[in-house]
Image (cartoon, grey):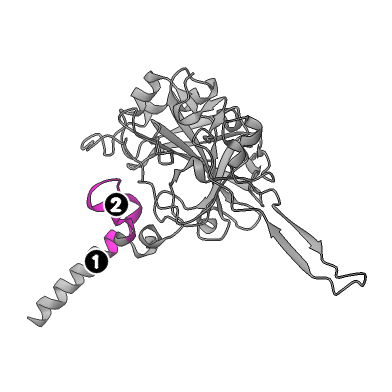
Amino acid sequence: MHQCSLFILTLVCVSVKDISGSWEEWWTYDGISGPGFWGLINPQWSMCNKGRRQSPVNIEPDKLLFDPWLRDIQFDKHKVSGILQNTGQSLVFRVEKDSKHQVNISGGPLSYRYQFEEIYFHYGMEDNRGSEHQIDKHTFPGEIQLYGFNKELYHNMSEAQHKSQGIVGISLMVQVGEPTSTDFRLITTAFNKVTYRGASYPIKHLPLSSLLPNTQQYLTYEGSTTHPGCWETAVWIIFNKPIYISKQEMYALRQLMQGSQLTPKAPLGNNARPVQHLNHRTVRTNINFNKQGLQGSHNCPDMYRNMHYTARYRGRKRSKKSVACKRNDKPKKCHKNSHPMAEGAHLAVQKR
């Protein structure tokens, strides 16, 4: 009996070791290995369940804070090459490690330079769902996320994702329509090359900056990666304009499968983590609603100095100077028409 118990214990230990070595492959977007269980199936991912600064989030227009000090986002113009891969959870593009020219991301809310590393594709099987971030509870058909790591403080993404100010996440909302960038076809024409899990395809000379929407308006907040282990080290930047892909390209994207060719399982789509609580975080924007001339925009809070300092005097003699800080009343919420993504029209309902 004692020998039998030892044998069973050995089998259990071996099984746990095998499972722990494949965490990166085991998680999914539904069922008992879905987002609600990410923090339970791997202790190193506990932040997925316990974190207070998680992503994605729903952006509430009436709680945006205008920050006049936010700068334009800067992307290097270099072209990058890498591998497009179906991981079984997402479609991911990862740049070549030994590339001579790396793309740096700077400006905006960033205090450091970040080196572009990878792209994640999130999309729905229908047009009414797909994006991870939401705008006023509106979901887009897809969302493309560009990740970079802080190259000034850390050596690579693996190190940076665990450290403060380690990661930048650039969010591009995706709409179905006439494509806005012909360069994006370098990726979309390769969708049928990565139909099954584990399939990969090389992408050469991708001009990353040309994939971005033609705007410098954006929203930003402090959050996490939206895949395990949900590290709360990300600065998120959400551009205030979508990018477009055609119906045919979206159809090809929706043909990708979670499994192998022998066991394809389910489609890869609907790979979006549910929105997380904002937990009193501030979402800032460089969109000046006052200059937009939107109705009710004068009530929108901003980060201009709403205080001044005065020296008080008593009689003719100068008393010991005391400083009084006078604040304006707490700003009211933005009018409902002062929508973010208001570059000509609301991004959430923008029509071409």
Residue 249: x percent and y percent? 40, 22
Residue lying at the far right in this picture: please name it: 316
Residue 312: x percent and y percent? 82, 66
- When the figure is inspected, residue 352 is found, relative to residue 173, above or below; the finding is above
- The secondary structure type at the circle numbered 2 is helix
- Judging depth in this view, the residue of 154 and 65 nearest the camera is 65
| Residue 226 seen in the figure | yes
Task: Mark 1: give few (<14), some (14-19) or many (20+) Cα within 10 Å.
Answer: few
Give the mark, 1 or 2, whose residue is nearer the N terminus: 1
Q: What's the amino acid at mark 2? A: Trp
Residue 48: x percent and y percent? 38, 57
Q: Residue at x 48, y 23 (%)?
A: 185
Residue 88: x percent and y percent? 32, 41
Residue picked out by circle 1: 14
- Judging depth in this view, the residue of 21 and 218 nearest the camera is 218
How many numbered marks does the figure carry? 2
| Residue 212 seen in the figure | no
Task: Mark 2: give few (<14), some (14-19) or many (20+) Cα within 10 Å.
Answer: some
Q: Residue at x 64, y 34 (%)?
A: 78
Quarter of the image for residue 263 reads top left
- The secondary structure type at the circle numbered 1 is helix
Q: Residue at x 39, y 35 (%)?
A: 139
Give how far apart the Cα atoms at labels 1 and 2 are. Answer: 17 Å
Circles 1 and 2: CB atoms closer than 8 Å: no
Residue lying at the far front in this picture: please name it: 315
Residue picked out by circle 2: 26
Q: Which residues are magenta?
A: 17-39
- Judging depth in this view, the residue of 29 and 175 nearest the camera is 175
**The magenta stretch spans residue 32:** yes
Q: What's the amino acid at mark 1? A: Val
**The magenta stretch spans residue 261:** no
> Relative to 158, is 32 on the left or the right?
left
